[in-house]
Amino acid sequence: MNPYDFVPLDIEHPPERRRPIWHNVLAPNNAHPAKLYSGSLYLYLEAETPLFIRDANSPVQDPRVPGEHIRNKAGEQIIPGSSLKGLLRSVVETLCRGCLTVINREYPVPAGFAPCENNQSLCIACRLFGMMQRQRQAEVFLGKVDIGDALVYEDGLYFYEPIYTAVLDAPKPRHRAFYFDQQGYIAGRKFYFHHAGDPSTVNGLIEIRNKPGEYRNQHIKPLDVGTEFSARLDFTSLEADEFAALMLAIALQPDMRHKIGYGKPIGLGSIRIAASELHLVDYAARYTAFRAGRGMSKYGVDEITNLLDGQMAAFDDPRVHQQWQRFSALPSLPQLYQIWQWPPDQSVEYAYPSQRWFKEHSQAPIAATRDLYRGD
C-alpha cells in the first residue's frame, strides 16, 4: 500500500478568519470580554518506532559513517521545537479548518483555503502559530504558542542499529490521480501511515546514476523505540477555540499517534505525545490577589489526563469543551484517524508503487494501491 494518504479539504467549510487577540492583551477587557488562556504545558514524548532527525547545520559526513540524530550544543539528543511546532500546526490546520500554508502555489486551491496574508484576518492556525511575511511590505503575526526543544531523558535513551534506508523517491504531483481531487483541486493534506515491524532498509548506499558520490538513500543511526523526551510549550492569550484546538492537536484520540522527522515513508518517526502537566495563569487575578496562588492553577498528570480524556468537559469554562466537540464533529478527525491509528495494521506492507505500476495505472487513485506489495 502507498505509504501516505490525504485528509481531504472540507470545501463546504473553508477556514474561519478573524482579527487575532494580540499578545499584550492578557486579561478580558471591553474589547475582548471573554476569558483568555495563558500558561505552560509540559509534554512527554516517546518513540514508538525508530526516530531520526538530522541536524541541517551539520557538515556533510562520510557516507560510510552513519549520520547521527540531532543534538543541541550541550550534546543532548533533541526533537527540535521548530519540528514540534510544525507538526502541531499541521494538525490544527487539518482538524480545525486552517488555511493551506505549506503548499506549492501552482497547485489549484479551493476558494477560501489560500494562505492567510492579512494579520487582521487570520485562520485559527495562523492565530496560534503565526503568519509569516508572504509579500513585500506585508505585516506579520508572531503567533501565541512557543515550543522549546524536547530534551532526551538520560535514562531513556536507546539507539537503533545503523541502517541504510530504502530509497525515499516519491510519486510526483504530476500523477494527478493521487494529488488532485475530481474537481481538479489539491487532494488535501498529506500524512504518512504508521508501520508495523522494522523500517524498510537496503544493504548499502545506492548511487545516483551519472552523479558519483551522490546517493538516493542515507546511512543513519536512529534512536530506538522507547527513547523518551520532555518539552515545554508556552501559550499566551488564547481564546477558547484556540485553546481547545491546541489541546486536541496534542491529545488526538488515545489510539492515535503523531509522526515526525526523517524517513516517515519507510516506517520511522511514530511518536506518542502526552500532556503531563498544565499551568494556567489568570493575569486579572495575578495582579490583584494577595493570597497564595495569585491566579495560578496547576493540573498534574492525572488531572490533565482526565480533562483530555473527557474533552475538557470538566474544565471551568464550558466553551472549551464546546469548541473541542465542534472540531471533533468535523470529518477531518476520523479521516486522519484512518492514517494515524495505533497500533498499525500488522497485515499491511507500505511501499511506493513501481514506475511500471504508474505507467500502467496512470489514472488510478491511491485507494488502488491497497493490495499492492513491494515491486508490483
Image (spheres, rainbow, N blue to C red):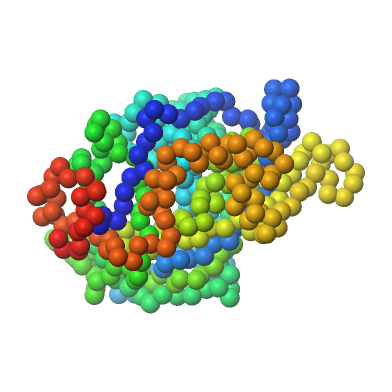
Seen as rendered, the residue at the extreme right is: 290
In the image, taking residue 69 as reference, residue 300 lies left or right, namely right
The N terminus sits in image quarter:
bottom left
Q: Position of residue 94 (x, y in %)?
A: 44, 41
Q: Is residue 24 above or below residue 211?
A: above
Seen as rendered, the residue at the extreme top is: 30
Residue drawn at the location 32% of the way across and 58% of the way down: 265
Is 300 in front, or is 133? Answer: 300
Is 129 in front, or is 275? Answer: 275
Image mark count: 0
Residue drawn at the location 21% of the way across and 53% of the way down: 369
In the image, taking residue 34 as reference, residue 374 lies left or right, namely left
Residue drawn at the location 80% of the way across and 44% of the way down: 295
Q: Is residue 163 above or below residue 369?
A: below
Q: Is residue 228 above or below residue 178?
A: below
- The answer to whether residue 63 of the structure is visible from this angle is no
The C terminus sits in image quarter:
bottom left
Q: Is residue 285 above or below residue 302?
A: above
Q: Position of residue 350 (x, y in %)?
A: 27, 60
Residue drawn at the location 31% of the way across and 49% of the way down: 5
Is 156 in front, or is 215? Answer: 156
Q: Quadrant of residue 74?
A: bottom right
- The answer to whether residue 153 of the structure is visible from this angle is yes
